Image: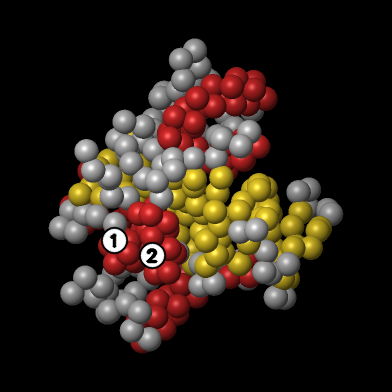
Amino acid sequence: MGRQNPSLVIMAEGMGSRFGGLKQIEPVDPEGHIIIDFSLFDAWRAGFRDVVFIIKREMEAEFRECFGDRMERYFHASYVFQELERLPEGISVPAGRAKPWGTGHALACCKGVVNGPFAVINADDFYGRTAFSEIYSFLEAQTDASKYAMVGYRLKNTVTEFGSVARGVCEIENGMLTGVTERTKIYKKGADAEYTEDGVQFFPLAGDTIVSMNLWGFSARVLDELWNRMGAFLNDAIPANPLKCEYFLPFVVNAQLADKSASVQVLPCEEAWYGVTYREDLDSVREAVARMKTEGIYTQALWT
């Protein structure tokens, strides 16, 4: 059996929740495209032909209507459902829990569907053309299942004027990731930034700091790691915070780095990342898209 071509996994389970549904997501150009349209277009240009959408089961019909069906002209599309009850043996959903279990759990749900190298992204984030070509090239060339990659962005290219953001701040040595620390309250401060844990004490962060925006390249082995480490994590986390604890993807990456069962190459990206953390961010995303169309990076109607 030949080597599998890289797949693209899109974490879309929370998509549209801020807007009251998929049809309410605000377009970023006059043609009616939303951010995921640009990600799929960039992924296709980079070489991806298989896409896996992680969604909630109840959004399947609306998702297919809004995106999935038309994307099947360009991709082989599969669907994975992130379900609250899909947990390791011996763990049950706490009474009153409605919140999904986090990005690590979402990705673990792909076990059995994704069997080769893959990239993973957030559905609501605009990563840019270079990021997809970099990660595709890495995955296509990689033969060692313990070697992963992450596209790293400069913090200054990912912050907003309108409030705090959460980012995975990366520690890097010789181009390799040594750890990711989640900082949940980062504020822009001139060309740099600062973060706080308690809202009282603030600590500086350089604008050139590399952060993770959840664009990773993995072998299918990571799906086993996610499942195998989930039970111990939830056994500790559920008693402490039964309704809101989350199993995040960087937790498992850090664990694998610590026990040296994987390495992560950082692929630096100098392009700006765009997202709509706050409604006011929409204007800057629209301006950026219009500029990129003027520069010829995208055609007006994308696929034509």
Q: Which residue does the image show at 31% across and 31% down from the upper left?
A: 112
Relative to 93, say whether 247 is above or below: below
Asked if residue 298 shows in the view, the reply is: yes
Q: Which residue does the image show at 27% across and 45% down from the upper left?
A: 4
x, y (%) of residue 101?
50, 33
Residue 36: name its quadrant.
Answer: bottom left
Considering every residue shown, the one lying at the far bottom of the view is: 294
Residue hosting label 1: 47
Quadrant (top left, top right, bottom left, bottom right) of the N terminus: top left
Q: Amino acid at mark 2?
A: Ser
Q: Which residue does the image show at 43% across and 69% down from the upper left?
A: 130
x, y (%) of residue 40?
31, 60
Residue hosting label 2: 133
| Gap between marks 1 and 2 measured at Cα | 8 Å
Q: Is residue 274 left or right of residue 304?
A: right
Mark 2 residue crowding within 10 angstroms, few (<14) / some (14–19) / many (20+): some
Q: Amino acid at mark 1?
A: Gly
Quadrant (top left, top right, bottom left, bottom right) of the C terminus: bottom left
Relative to 112, say whether 149 is above or below: below
x, y (%) of residue 78?
25, 43
Residue 73: name its quadrant.
Answer: bottom left
